[in-house]
Amino acid sequence: MPEGLWPILVMIFLIIVYTIAKVIQHMRKSEEQWRQVDKSKLREWDDDDWPDA
């Protein structure tokens, strides 16, 4: 392998790991926020409830 390829592969690997970590962090935050929602105010939507465009 060319000598300069390893730093590029390491950089790509670190970017992938960072991206996965951020996605997991945002998923956990979203779950926490969903648990805090006042679900009594939620309602089911039917197709008839959407305004006609």
Image: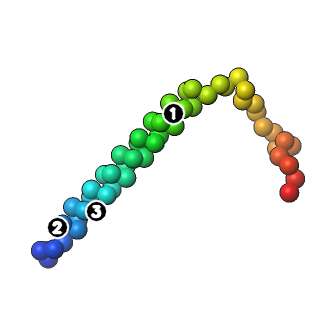
Image location of residue 11, percent across then percent down: 25, 62
Alpha-carbon span between mark 3 and mark 2 = 10 Å
* Kind of residue sitting beneath label 1: Glu
Mark 1 residue element = helix
Q: Residues within 10 Å of mark 1 (few under 14, many from 20)?
A: few
Left or right: residue 17 compared with residue 50: left
Badge 1 is on which residue?
Answer: 31
Q: Residues within 10 Å of mark 2 (few under 14, many from 20)?
A: few
* Kind of residue sitting beneath label 3: Ile
**Which mark sits nearer the N-terminus, 2 or 1?**
2
Mark 3 residue element = helix
**Which mark sits nearer the N-terminus, 3 or 2?**
2
* Kind of residue sitting beneath label 2: Trp
Alpha-carbon span between mark 3 and mark 1 = 29 Å
Residue 3 disc label: none
Residue closer to the observer: 22 or 45: 22
Image location of residue 30, percent across then percent down: 51, 37
